[in-house]
Image (cartoon, rainbow, N blue to C red):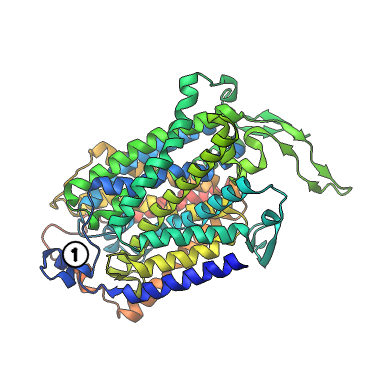
Amino acid sequence: MYLALAVLGLYWEFYKRGLKLSVNSAVDAISADLSENVAAQNATLHRKIGWQGAFWVASGVPALVLFSIGAIAATVGKPAWMIWAISIAFGFIQAFTYAEIAGLFPHKSGGASIYGAVAWVKYSKFIAPVSVWCNWFAWSPVLAIGSGLAAGYMLSALFAPDAVINTWQITLLDLSMVKDGLVLRINATFIVGAAVLLSVFAVQHGGILRSAKTTMILGVIALIPLMLIGLVPLMTGDISQANFFPLAPLAHDAAGNVTDGVWGIEGWKLMAGGLFIAAWSTYGFETAVCYTREFKNPKTDTFKAIFYSGLLCVAVFTLVPIAFQSHLGLGHMVTPAVVDAAGVVTTPAVYDGMLESSIYSGMGVAAAFSGIVGGGAFVANVMVIMMVLALMLSIMTSMAGSSRTLYQASVDGWLPKYLSHVNDHGAPTRAMWTDLCFNLLLLMMSDYVFILAASNVGYIIFNFLNLNSGWIHRIDRPKWDRPYKAPTILLVLGGILGFVNLSIMGLGADVWGAGTLKVGLLFAALILPVFVYRHYIQDKGVFPKQMLEDMHLDEHEDGVANRAGVLPYIALAAGIGLVWFLHSL
């Protein structure tokens, strides 16, 4: 109780500081850069970092492997390691498109969804805000899931599983109509997780430079265990081929024993489900371009930031899953399920290895990683602490990126005006508060894997729209300066991968729970009434002046035209048809 009161008191103190330090960001980014007026410069995001700063802020992305590595392994089986390798390869190819479109708008923050929205706005006012919204609600849950996992790691390390602090719970709302077993609850995980979120908020409140310095320190500390985990099995040669082959999907016989499945429709559904959920982590380093507005030299820093962040992610997302799978193995049934006279399962079967229940939830991943390195209880506790720091790093990455997406979306006229404020340090505090409150609600939910899967529906939609925005920009804005111009073959591959992503979503989203796709699409649609309120009620159907100028949306401007014609609409129709067809299977 005292801890809860302390958290609430800290929350109120930050809220008062946020109100006190927030200033209206009515000055547009271009005017702020050209102005010698300090007040005008301080009214928008500050140019404080180089590409190295963005690299360290984005260095929290490799820690996202902790979020779903267990769930993918426990769901897909032996092909899990291959899913991570394929997914990060997709993400790396896509990054070249994002680097190009980010270079078109050096005065804008918020990431690829903001830059991609410009391509779509001339074809539909309603498609552009969907892109921005989907990017935000895909990234924002990192705060809740990461803080929940960090809290779980700490509580598991300090207390026994059956200790009162780990078992007490106050149920606030039953959400079983959304997913079986899903509830809103308050427990020790929520309280400790809320404290983690507030500590990250306090750092971010000081602006991007302080955030970059903090993430650099956290990054050096937190990335050490991830790299050790990936490299130790390679150096020792402790890799069991039997844990990886044959490459057959996970299946069970009638008694519940683990068997090798076949590559029929069910096997490919599992593969698609694995690629779907892995994308949420492996594509995440695109957040490195969220800070274009805060780069000292955006023309050169943008590409370097996303490219080197991508190389780091390729190493982590390839090596760590291999080490994880080699150490645990697929697993076997330890105790069969218990059923009643009606055939209803009263006690589920118990498995070991990657199929162990705590691996699926993520709470047992830290202990599994500690076992890879070895060294006894002391080393295991040190590893858990470093894993917690890695999760805090990912939370910092998410809060920095998602809050800037909200901020820029408000400045551009997509979201309510109150979000377009920064404090004296250039931090978008109103957007940060919105992120924080939303994630405190998510932190109360009992199933983090479902939250991740539902939010990833939005992430796949965002990726589809923005990968296609690359060729739309090329056609509509051929004369614009491109500090980095992606090879045409990579731009084409990015567009194709947009459809591949929709395919794995249509086929595999509901692997993570019936209704996952529908819930994700419903949340994506929530932006429509929000945008109608902002655009047609607050702005009377006219975009803000600085948005029109900065994005060069004047139809008569030389070098900008709707040259793509009906192609964007054909792409949308094809994407919708693809999802519907594959989901119907």
Q: Is residue 565 left or right of residue 181?
A: left
Q: Quadrant of residue 173?
A: bottom right
Q: Is residue 567 visible?
A: no
Which type of secondary structure does the marked residue at label 1 adopt? helix
Q: Residues within 10 Å of mark 1 (few under 14, many from 20)?
A: some
The residue positioned 17% from the left and 71% from the top of the image is 40
Rendering coords of residue 312 (x, y %): 35, 37
Vertical arrangement, residue 223 with respect to residue 479, above or below: above
Viewer-side residue, 150 vs 569: 150
Q: Which residue is mark 1?
A: 550
Q: Quadrant of residue 318?
A: top left
Viewer-side residue, 561 vs 348: 348
Rendering coords of residue 267 (x, y %): 59, 35
Give the residue type that dot 1 points to. Asp
Rendering coords of residue 7 (x, y %): 52, 66
The total number of labels drawn is 1
Q: Is residue 345 left or right of residue 5?
A: right
Vertical arrangement, residue 371 with respect to residue 545, above or below: above
Q: Quadrant of the N terminus?
A: bottom right
